[in-house]
């Protein structure tokens, strides 16, 4: 079935780095844009980043611009998020999510199970 | 950035009741509006896209309407399994933005 399985996450100190992965199966990964969305403890959903189906561009929320990098490996059906210069306020559950259709980005029809990132000294 | 204002932030209703949530965009987003359901400890679930189209497999008691800046989400016959937080989200342009969420409980 169509699914996204996440790995990575953990507890790190401020200023450190972490890499999240999201393995796709059950659909043609290389045909869809992908996103990262995060949710701080007890808070709402915040969009983080988007990458088109071919990886030709990357888009970021202002809060992570210059610190986070989204990428994808279409040969391995995997999406990545590199988190650098982490701050306490980056503490959240991070979800990967798939675009519903190729023609218009932003309707997120399939979500990963989430990965907890805790930034604490 | 487009701001999404969702209300109420929480509500309590009885099984079988009709529940309505509203979402207002800070600018015209046409019908580029989605609704998600999130249960505690789980990932969001995609319910409605393009303001009013039901995702495959979603029960028909869920519905959405609206365009431009004002949108509504309705559960027509509230069931115990509908206890969750519901979010609207615009995808007229990036950055994608979400409403603050509405927590739905059973009275």
Image: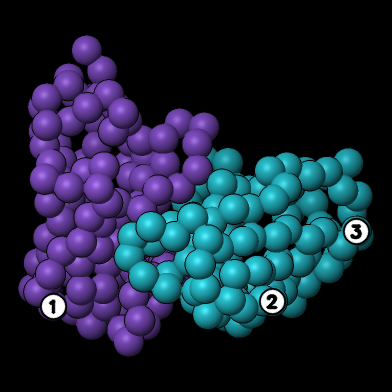
| Label 1: element kind | loop
Quadrant location of residue B107?
top right
Q: Residues within 10 Å of mark 2 (few under 14, many from 20)?
A: some
Which tag, 2 or 3, sits closer to the chain's start?
3
In the image, what residue occupies the spot 49% across and 55% down? B3
Q: Is residue B45 visible?
A: no
For numbered disc 2, what is the local secondary structure?
strand
Tags 1 and 3 on a common chain: no
Please name the residue that numbered disc 2 is placed on. Answer: B65
Measured along the vertical axis of the image, is residue A38 above or below residue A49? above
Q: Position of residue A61 (x, y in %)?
A: 27, 51
Crowding near pointer 3: few (<14 within 10 Å), some, many (20+)? some
Q: Nearer the viewer, residue B67 or A18?
A: B67
Q: Horizontal and vertical percent for residue B55?
A: 57, 78
Which chain does the residue under circle 1 lie in? A
Q: Residue at x 50, y 74 (%)?
A: B29
Q: Which mark is residue A54?
A: 1
Residue B18 in view here: yes
Q: Are marks 2 and 3 on the same chain?
A: yes
Q: Position of residue A63 (x, y in %)?
A: 26, 42
Q: Chain of mark 3?
A: B
The residue wearing badge 3 is: B17
* Residue A84: quadrant of the picture: top left
């Amino acid at each position: 079935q169509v699914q996204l399985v996440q790995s990575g996450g953990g507890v790190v100190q401020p200023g450190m780095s972490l890499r999240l992965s999201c393995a796709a199966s059950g659909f043609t990964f290389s045909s869809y844009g992908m996103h990262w969305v995060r949710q701080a403890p007890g808070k709402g959903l915040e969009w983080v980043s988007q990458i088109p189906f071919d990886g030709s561009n990357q888009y970021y929320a202002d809060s992570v611009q210059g610190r986070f990098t989204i990428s994808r490996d279409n040969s391995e059906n995997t999406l990545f998020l590199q988190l650098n210069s982490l701050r306490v306020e980056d503490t959240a559950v991070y979800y990967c999510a798939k675009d519903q259709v190729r023609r218009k980005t932003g309707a997120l029809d399939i979500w990963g199970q989430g990965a907890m990132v805790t930034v604490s000294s | 950035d487009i701001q999404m204002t969702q209300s109420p932030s929480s509500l309590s209703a009885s099984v079988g009741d009709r529940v309505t949530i509203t979402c207002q965009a800070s600018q015209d987003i046409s019908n580029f509006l989605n609704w998600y359901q999130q249960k505690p400890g789980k990932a969001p679930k995609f319910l409605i896209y393009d303001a009013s189209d039901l995702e495959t497999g979603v029960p028909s008691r869920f519905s959405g309407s609206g365009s431009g800046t004002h949108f509504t989400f309705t559960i027509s016959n509230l069931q115990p399994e509908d206890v969750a937080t519901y979010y609207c989200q615009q995808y007229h342009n990036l950055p994608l933005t979400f409403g603050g969420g509405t927590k739905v409980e059973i009275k």
